[in-house]
Image (cartoon, rainbow, N blue to C red):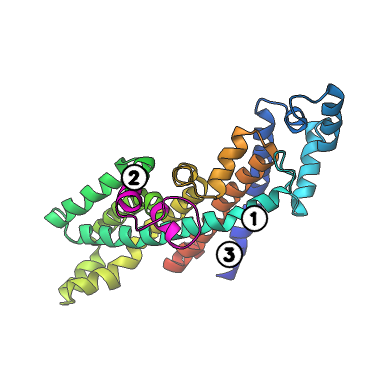
Amino acid sequence: MLRYVVKRILGMIPTLLLVTIFVFMFIHLIPGDAARLSAGPEASQQTVETIRKQLGLDKPLLAQYGIWMNHLLHGNLGTSIQTKRPVIYEIGQRYWKTMSLALASLIWSTIVGVLLGVWSGRHRSHWQDYTGMTVAVSGISLPSFWIGFIVIIIFSVNLKVLPATGADSWKSLILPSFTLGAGIAAVLARFTRSSIVEVLKEDYVRTARAKGIKEKRVVWRHAFRNALIPVVTVAGLQFGFLLGGSVIVESVFAYPGLGSLLLDSINTRDYPCVQALILIFSLHFILINLIVDILYAVLNPEIQLS
């Protein structure tokens, strides 16, 4: 197992290098002058050129990339053009808020989605199956911002039981996490249902049933673990999207996370902040893929030998 994990970690190194190159080049292809933006619209050309030298923008791209990588390896993500504070400080203030929101969304959506998928798969072509898949299709079809507005109207405006904005307490997580996780639960339900249906056709399941084992035990003890393998992949990828795709939901609920920071940074052309956020979101996907690969090996030890 340790050898497998080490191989997967070493395999991440070329991907990490490519990600840094793409992130660096992407930001430099965006229209606009970072030096002019940092200096302000009323600044003279001489001031702009001075700031350009301070930012290192007067150097060739290869040299800029080398300087950026050197700073990156030392934990320096640059300085925000808007706030003049280190980018790592700006991100640090919001990182755990977004992580908390993503984790809360993933936990409830995984539990609900998997249970709904197993329930539908066990009762294939019956009313339970049709009901479960109708709920799942509805969750996928409804836009997240629409769900957000509806739950705000119901629970914040009418019932006044949950806050609509901010991140002051655990209650502030309930509505955004529900809005963000609704689509994820629906996707997981459909994947789990399909996986359960396929696994229940296997020979070892028929053998277990022939031995007189109760259906619940057949499903949860014999079929469930093998059915989880494709579901783990989907859940891992969805968690990456939760971390990087929370911009709309955070905007609807005025939630002070990384999504709203990215939106603000793009609007103000705060290039160092945008660059750092895109890099962090990309690293999340790489790390999540590593965790998914390890979970694969735990669920199916034969994968380690392939």
Mark 3: which secondary structure? helix
| Rendered image: mark on residue 5 | 3
The spot of residue 158 in percent (x, y) is 30, 50
Dot 3 alpha-carbon crowd within 10 angstroms: few under 14, some 14 to 19, many 20 or more: some
Front disc: 2 or 3: 2
Disc 1: which residue: 92
- Answer with the quarter of the image where residue 111 lies: bottom left
Dot 1 alpha-carbon crowd within 10 angstroms: few under 14, some 14 to 19, many 20 or more: few
Instruction: Tell me the distance, in whole angstroms, between the alpha carbons under discs 1 and 3.
Output: 29 Å
163 and 223: which is toward the camera: 163
The answer to whether residue 59 of the structure is visible from this angle is no
Type of residue at label 3? Val
- Answer with the quarter of the image where residue 173 lies: bottom left
Q: Quick one: label 1 or label 3, which is nearer the N terminus?
A: 3
Q: Quick check: marks 2 and 1 in contact, CB under 8 Å?
A: no
Mark 1: which secondary structure? helix
**In which quadrant of the rendered image does the N terminus lie?**
bottom right
The spot of residue 295 in percent (x, y) is 47, 64
Residue 171 is inside the magenta segment: yes
Residue ID at (37%, 61%): 108
Residue 213 is inside the magenta segment: no
Q: Is residue 58 left or right of residue 2?
A: right
Type of residue at label 1? Gly
Residue ID at (16%, 57%): 128
| Rendered image: mark on residue 104 | none
Residue span colored magenta: 152-176
The answer to whether residue 244 of the structure is visible from this angle is yes
Question: In the image, is residue 94 above or below residue 225?
Answer: above
Type of residue at label 2? Ile
Disc 2: which residue: 147
Residue ID at (46%, 55%): 236
